[in-house]
Amino acid sequence: MLRFVVVRLSQSLVALAILSVVVFILARATGDPLSMVLPMSATEEDYANARAYLGLDRSYLEQYVSFVGRAAIGDFGTSIRARRPVSELIRERLPNSFKLAAFAMGVSVAMAFPLGILAAVKKGTAIDRGAQIVSILGQSLPTFWLAIVLVEFVAGRLQWLPAVGDGTLASYVLPGFTLGWFVVAGMMRLLRSSMLEVLDSEYVKLARVKGVIEPRVVWLHALKNALIPVVTFAGIYFSILVTTAIVVETVFAWPGLGRLAYEGITGRDFPVIQAVVLVTAAIVAVVNLGVDCLYAVIDPRIRVAR
Amino acid sequence: MKRAIQVFALLLLVLGVAVTPSVAQGKTDLVIGFAGLAQETLDPPVAGHFNKYYLALLYDYLVGTTNDGTLSPKGGIATKWENSADYKRWTFTLRRDARFHNGDPVTAEDVKFSIERNIGKRSTTGYAGPLRTLIATIETPAPDRVVIVTKEPTLIIPTYLSRALSSEGMVTPKKYIESVGDEAFARKPVGSGPYKFVEHVSGSHIKLEAFANHWRTGTPKYKTITFRIVPEETTRIALLRRGEVDVTDISRERVKELEREGYPMHFRKEDAVVSMWTVLDPNGGWPAPMKDKRVREAMNLAIDRTEVAQAIFGGHALPAAIPLGLSWSFKEIGLRVTPEMAYPHDVARAKKLLADAGHPNGFPLDVYAFLLPGFPEGKAFAEAIAGYWEKVGIKPKLIPVDYAAFRKNWVDRKAPGATGYFNIANRNWVGAYALLEKMAYTPSKPNDTAADPEIDGMIKQVMSQTDQAKINALMRNIFTRLRSEHLGYPIVYLHSPYASSKALASWNPGTVMYDFFFDELAATK
């Protein structure tokens, strides 16, 4: 197990190193960040001064070496736009994204698990068809549309729930639901098909023959084995929710990592873009590693095979 | 199922009640919800124009203004300013009752330190460059006296350092900054304005707290002012309806909807002029075919400005007549825009002018299309203008880019003959002059848009002129010539709408560049 973790970590470090080169080049290919920071009437002298102050007048190689050297110790440089250390901005925004993603994942699990399991157990019934409708809606309703509709009606007109994040539990409901809704469909369909497969397996039939009561068959024997693909799915989607919830964070004024990335891109803030991409990649790598380890916990056969 | 619905409804109720706006927010708190807070920086030299409306609460200016931009000894640290006979020494007398939020008095040393810091090389403010060029030294003969010595005679030092323009005139505490350093200061700024810093949560909000017995406002009536970032307009409007924001910026297209609901609308009239220009050739001259004055006139006559104002900007705009014509300066310099100066929409004459200039079948024209802050209509606007030009025979090609890409082509002169635009913030005569010096003065090279030796000569004279009447005449002549020679394509003046809660019906956002005078809203004296 330890060897497995070390190998996976090494692979992740190589991927991060390659990514750092790619993101460094791509961020600079988009144009001059100073045109977004300096006033429209700024002179070339103003540009030269700002360029020198921010170290953008150095060669690309010098800039890259400096970027990698500092990133290795968690220093991602200074934001061109905000003139603050990028690591500070990440520290402020990342927990917000984690909290929202965790809430959204909670919403997804709370909706997808009962629906997915019931749809499998009651295959072909009205419940199954209802679950399919939820699934279709989840995959087809654009996130931005759902977010705007919820803000306009639930928050603005009916005034049932807050429109923006304000630290209260209530303020998590609309963004969390919007973000989680997208995951519900996929998770539910996956769980349903996985459950159907497991419920049809020999060991489940044996359990039933032995007289194990149906709820125990479903929730204990079948669900545990049906969980493996769902855990993979949830792991991948959790890292996606943390890092790319740009639309939801924008509509609900949620100061998370997605919006930081968006602000970095629109402001051509190289240090922010580079840091967000690297942090995102690191999160994905860590979550994937965590998911792999979780397999072993759920299914001892995997642990033995390794 | 019924039980599940009941539980869900109860949950919503419980969660909703927990944050009922009227409970969460007292009436002593003012919340401003804007789409963005620019760079969210709190340090004057790295803030510049765009952050002025919240920095003006945190800091005092050396020279204050009224909300129409008139310099006022009642609004700034300086209660009096005088020039020497040769206009090269400006003496500012400072008020003695101004204190920083940490209790230190505001002294001449702080003012000197602030100006030098605000125009230093790390500054990204709008007028740091010209001030660096102009100022020779700053003297502090007494704790309440500052003397600014300039290299050339000038009239414009007080205005440059006033609230009318950018942030170069904001006063910061020397001792505190020297003890904590620039970075720590930016994180926890200390000013002497009517509000002190409480917290800044990046991407979320900036919160300020009233500073008791402030000389400018008295004890402000709002205990706190929070500037909240709400990027999505639907969300800002929802917050206004919920009573969670008191003032918000809205798009021109949603004005009627909110007016119908009874929300007071506040317009900053002629907040910006949307001006188009031709990218000059690499030598700084007019490229063909715009070199011919008739072509430039034809391009102006082809545009139906009234229709643009109505169709693109929902009627919240006015036709503009003068290239780079910053209209808030017109009153100061005594320029009256006559009906004859307005460009009529005259397709027949435009076609004739093009034919006379040797282009009966038009010519290819690159039209860059991009969005700008405060100008979401940018691309639709560019398409409309291209459409007008097409109708007179020109063959426009729309090139969708972002502003940075256009700017590079503009200042590097890589696309001679192409057109671009900007919603240039309106400003007073000094601001207008500074803009002309950047965009209509050939020696400033990269930004020039109006190659014209006569205008160059007049701009140069303004720089060294110390007689205000003569300056005004020069400024009038510059604008008149920009119009008569068609040295650009002025399109419309934009009115920027802001909606407020019904309690703030009397708010006047003023007519000062990038300022909203929220301190006047909070003033108790």
Image: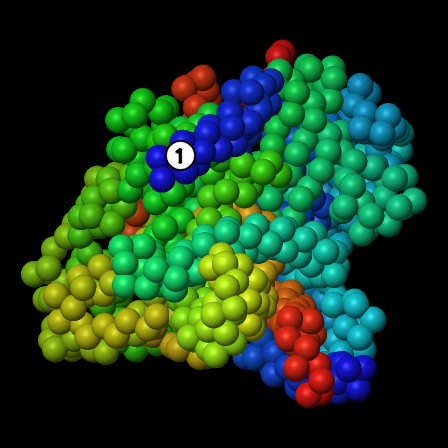
Residue, x 81% and y 29% (percent of image)?
A: B100
Q: Nearer the viewer, residue A65 or B449?
A: A65
Q: Image quarter for residue B277? A: bottom left
Query: What kind of residue is marked 1?
Result: Arg
Q: In this rendering, would B41 be left or right of B367?
A: right
Residue, x 39% and y 62% (percent of image)?
A: A121
Query: Which residue does the numbered mark 1 point to in the structure image?
Result: B3
Does B215 appear above or below B340? above
Q: Quadrant of the C terminus of chain A?
A: bottom right
Describe the element under mark 1 as helix, strand or loop: helix
Residue B320: give x, y in percent of width and height: 29, 46
Residue B498: give x, y in percent of width and height: 41, 33
Q: Nearer the viewer, residue B204 or B21?
A: B21
Q: Image quarter for residue B1? A: top left
Residue B367: give x, y in percent of width and height: 30, 69
Q: Nearer the viewer, residue B307 or B416?
A: B307
